[in-house]
Amino acid sequence: MSLTVTPQQAPTGRSTGPIANTLTAGKLPRFAALWVLLGCLAVTTAFFVILAVASETGFNIAAAVFLGVVLYGVVIWVLSRVVEGTRKAKDRLVTALVSTAFTIALLPLISVAYTTIANGVPRFDLQFFSESMRNVVGAGGGALHAIMGTLLITGMAALISVPVGLLTAIYLVEYGRGKLKHGITFFVDVMTGIPSIVAGLFAFALFALFTGDPGIRMGFGGAVALSVLMIPVVVRSSEEMLKLVPNELREASYALGVPKWLTIVKVVLPTSIAGIITGVMIAIARVIGETAPLLIIAGFTTSMNYNLFEGRMMTLPVFVYTQYMNQGTDVQAYIDRAWAGALTLILIVALLNVIARVVSKLFSPKTGR
């Protein structure tokens, strides 16, 4: 025999059971964390606004956001400890610490992007992308010669680095054994940390010895210098992606009688192509903004130069450096061109990353049926 207790029915037919209050039930309301965060940000924002008015300085939005997130961590921990208990308070505290770390990492990125966009937009016009700096000493001019130089030198560096780095990674994962493998891995790790100016000095010394010209400057030398910096990144990223390919796939291919080289081409590389492309894009982003090696071996010029093997060639990092450091009579014009060049460089890197995501998505193996 069972006893069933039914809740009282309201005139409308709905149940009239007890109404639970989340505060008294040992749980904060659903959106309590959000409202606490917004309140803390409002408090710190008001504080820095008053401070800016009192001291007649600019409003520091980065400090306001950072201190607001820190204050949020303290307040949400206290509230959770009072209402929900120690265990839930620790969980919310760790979540707040993770949010604070994320904010610390994100603020410099947003600050750099905002500053570059705000200062680069005034010269981000058609003239900037259609003219060079030849015979320009004041306002006007553009960075067409620097943009073309950056694309040519970086493209040549990628053309050198990607085959060498990928084949090296294939050897280390698929063929390498013993001391030779460990030696190559050691030198790749050492090359990953060399200063960029050393790569520029190496390329300059190499071509000066080959040509006998102690003052040689050319774009191909800059591509070689960038490839020295790019190859280790390609090797390490490609090696890690190849290691993620399950051995069962290789063994299944061998069981069907497929030779090892064809297994690598048809099974291993297609499986890891998305990660390899991402690694290549990271390597390109690593070297496309280098200034010191290109300043040494590629030099700088105000004219167009499409020939990688003859004459000086301007690149965007060197263009930004020279515009900022060698200001003429119209100082603001030089500063505007420098910021516009920096913005252009950021957009090129962003575009390359978007292309890499699209290509990796198209060529990655399809897991769905």
Image (cartoon, grey):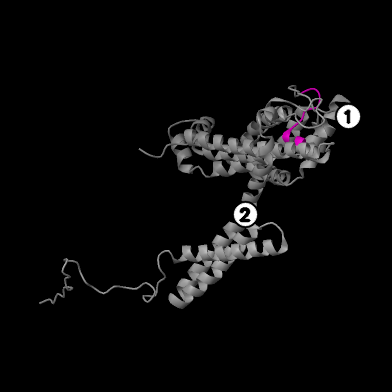
Gap in angstroms between the C-alphas marked 1 and 2: 43 Å
Q: Position of residue 311 (x, y in %)?
A: 81, 24
The picture places residue 151, in percent across and down from the top left corner, at 68, 29
Indicate which label's residue lies in the foreground, 1 or 2. 2
What crowding class fits label 2: few (fewer than 14 Cα within 10 Å), some (14-19), or many (20 or more)? some
Classify the position of the C terminus by image quarter: top left
Going 45% across and 71% down the picture, which residue do you hit? 88
The disc at residue 107 is: 2
Residue 222 rendering spot, x and y as whole percentages: 76, 32
Q: What quarter of the picture does the N terminus occupy?
A: bottom left
Q: How packed is label 1: few (under 14 Cα within 10 Å), some, or many (20 or more)?
A: few
Q: Identify which residue is drawn at 86% across, 29% down.
A: 209
- The residue range painted magenta reads 309-319
Q: Amino acid at mark 1?
A: Gly
Instruction: Determine the secondary structure under disc 2.
Output: helix
Majority secondary structure of the magenta segment? loop
Q: Is residue 183 above or below residue 297?
A: below
Compared across the picture, whether 74 is left or right of 220 comes to left
Question: Does residue 318 show up magenta in the picture?
Answer: yes
Task: Kindly tell me whether residue 95 is visible in this rendering.
Answer: no
Please tell me which residue is depicted at 64% across the width and 60% down the height of the picture: 63
Residue 215 numbered tag: 1
Asked whether residue 284 is in view, the answer is yes
* Element at label 1: loop
The type of residue carrying mark 2 is: Leu
Instruction: Residue 175: name its quadrant.
Output: top right
Question: Which of the two discs, 1 and 2, labels the residue nearer the N terminus?
Answer: 2
Find residue 331 and name its label.
none
